[in-house]
Image (cartoon, grey):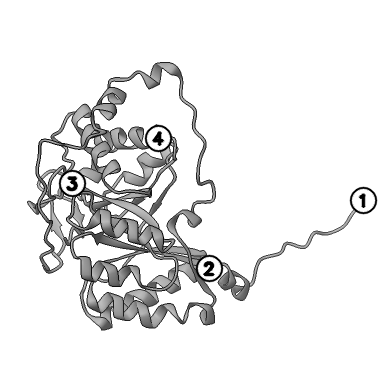
Amino acid sequence: MSGFFIVWHPSAAELNERSRIAIIMDDMGNSLEIGTAAIGLPGNITYSFLPFAMHSRRLALLASRHGKEIMLHAPMQALSDKPMGSGGLTVSLDRNEVVRRFSAQLVAVPGISGVNNHMGSALTRDPVTMGWLMEALARKPDALYFVDSVTTDHSVAKKVADAHRVPALSRDVFLDHVNSEVKIREQFELLISTAKRRGYAVAIGHPRVNTLKVLRERLSDLDRIGVELVPVSALLPQYPIPRTFPVKQRQLPVQIAEQKAMEPLKTRKYGAIRIRPISLKPNFQTASDKLLIREFDLF
């Protein structure tokens, strides 16, 4: 029997109708005033909180009451000497200490659905340390996801997350790495064009006056241009992923370290983490591999 098949390809208009964006508002918790204003933005923006910032818990609870998705903005070591704040993760720590600190961060912000890295251009390059973090996430019964902020071109974070079956995405656009209305609008257009081309895109912004102003203006246009703003979790088709682990794996020393971390770093006092505006660093070469990289550890 002969015949032919019609191969259907969706039109550009049909693809546009399905285009979705997620916007993560990083560095939440330092300022009560600007944080509250950020939470007041319309739509399904996702908010990522520094674990030990002065106002993180209060603002996270406020965001939750407004039906917003919450993330942990986990401080990780940069290639530069920028301070991470208390309880940050570094490549010099052993496995148990990494998991203890990470577990302390996870319980510091209430109601989180996922994690992304704060700074981390050094740590996200290290597959061993990232493996320990993903093992810790994979054991969580609530199936937390991970978003790679991509603060270095050599990040292995998503690759390692995928290997451990942790639901994961990577950042596509920084909205405000240059803090000007003109540049933020340009980056928002890049976000939209990326989503229309691929079907989805992930952006990261920060609670700043210029960023909030541009978002208030542009978010109202999304329905008209056929783009939907969704929480990060909505871009993960298999989220949450059910996980089962053998009894032997549950008895690893890492699990013991996690239990010890449930009262996060009680002996230490945490001061407010301050944001200092700094300029974007140009490309440079590392001494170890002599490869050009970009560093986006802005804060």
Looking at this view, name the residue that lies furthest to the left. Answer: 81
User: Which residue is rendered at x = 44% and y = 35% of the image?
Assistant: 141
Q: State how far apart marks 4 and 2 are (Cα).
A: 29 Å
Left or right? Give the position of 29 relative to 188.
Answer: left
> Which labelled disc corresponds to residue 122?
3
Residue 133: x, y in percent?
30, 37
Q: Nearer the viewer, residue 131 or 108?
A: 108
Of labels 4 and 2, the one closer to you:
4
**Residue 1, numbered circle:** 1
Q: First in sequence, mark 1 or 3: give its number.
A: 1
**Residue type at numbered disc 2:** Ser
Kindly state the secondary structure of the residue where label 2 is placed.
Answer: strand
| In the depicted structure, whether residue 66 falls above or below residue 41 | above
What's under tag 4, amino acid-wise? Ala
Mark nearer the viewer, 4 or 1: 4
Q: Is residue 194 above or below residue 101?
A: below
Q: Amino acid at mark 3?
A: Ala
Label 3 Cα crowd, 10 Å radius (few <14 / some 14-19 / many 20+): many
Mark 1 vs mark 3, foreground winner is 3
SS for tag 4? helix
| SS type, badge 1 | loop
Q: If the image is split into quadrants, where does the C terminus sit?
A: bottom left
Mark 4, residue position = 138
Residue drawn at (42%, 40%) of the image? 166
Q: Is residue 88 above or below residue 184?
A: above
Dot 4 or dot 2, earlier in sequence: 2
Which residue has dot 2 on it? Answer: 19
Disc 1/disc 3 C-alpha distance (Å): 62 Å
